[in-house]
Image (cartoon, grey):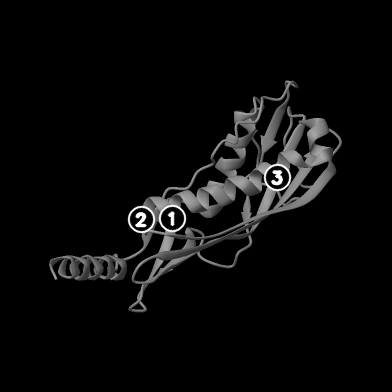
Amino acid sequence: MKKIGQLAVLLMLIMAFAGCAEKGPILLSVSYQPSGEQASPKKITVGVSPFRDARGVAVSVVGKRTIPSGLKNELVVQGTAAEIATASLKQALVSRGIAVKDAAGWDLTAEGMMARGTALVLGGEIKTLWLESTASPVKTHLQVGVQLKIVAGDPSEKKIIRTIDVSSKLDQDVLYSREKLEQALSEALSSAIDQIFKDEELKKIL
């Protein structure tokens, strides 16, 4: 009977914690997670233009958390999703030994390219960057989707070299914590960005 009572108390605590609602938006820290790939043997400088956000949602919102009572919280980042994606691309390049230079805003056309002094300019558009967190009494289900359009150009010739779409999905059950949300979104974003370096045409340059 004592064990049954302890189990009942434990179950009630789990349900209480799962149902707790945080007030207002939940701030997440999202960043690139290095893959451990070897540094590039080439010594080049790449200009990185700020990402454009084409998601059609508020610029700092990256998801939603829903608890059993039906209450919802927005998941947000400090700054904007575009700034997070841009910083992650820069970190991915630096982690591979590639020098990075800030490039001006770019409309992703050959005519609009402005990145003098670099061998390559990279820009992009966020199509999806979203985390759905749905809590039940004993677990939290996470669904993450990231879709990016990456455009690479030669600024000396004002020519588009490559346009690729990269994406990543994550679907898992976890015990809820803010850190688990941050880890899931960072992992999915990093996985999508790492696909840039697997593209055969870009690999020849980078």
Q: If the image is split into quadrants, where does the C terminus sit?
A: top right
Dot placed on the residue nearer the N-terminal end, 2 or 3: 2
Distance Cα–Cα, label 2 vs label 1: 7 Å
**Identity of the residue drawn at 77% across and 42% down:** 152
Asked if residue 154 can be seen in this view, the reply is no
User: Could you say which is closer to the camera, residue 72 or residue 25?
Assistant: 72
Q: Residues within 10 Å of mark 2 (few under 14, many from 20)?
A: few
Distance Cα–Cα, label 2 vs label 3: 28 Å
Residue where numbered disc 3 is placed: 195
Residue where numbered disc 2 is placed: 177
Q: Which mark is residue 167?
A: none
Give how far across and how far down residue 37 sits, in percent. 65, 31
Give how far across and how far down residue 29 sits, in percent. 42, 48
Give how far across and how far down residue 31 sits, in percent. 50, 43
Residue where numbered disc 1 is placed: 181
**Identity of the residue drawn at 39% across and 50% down:** 179
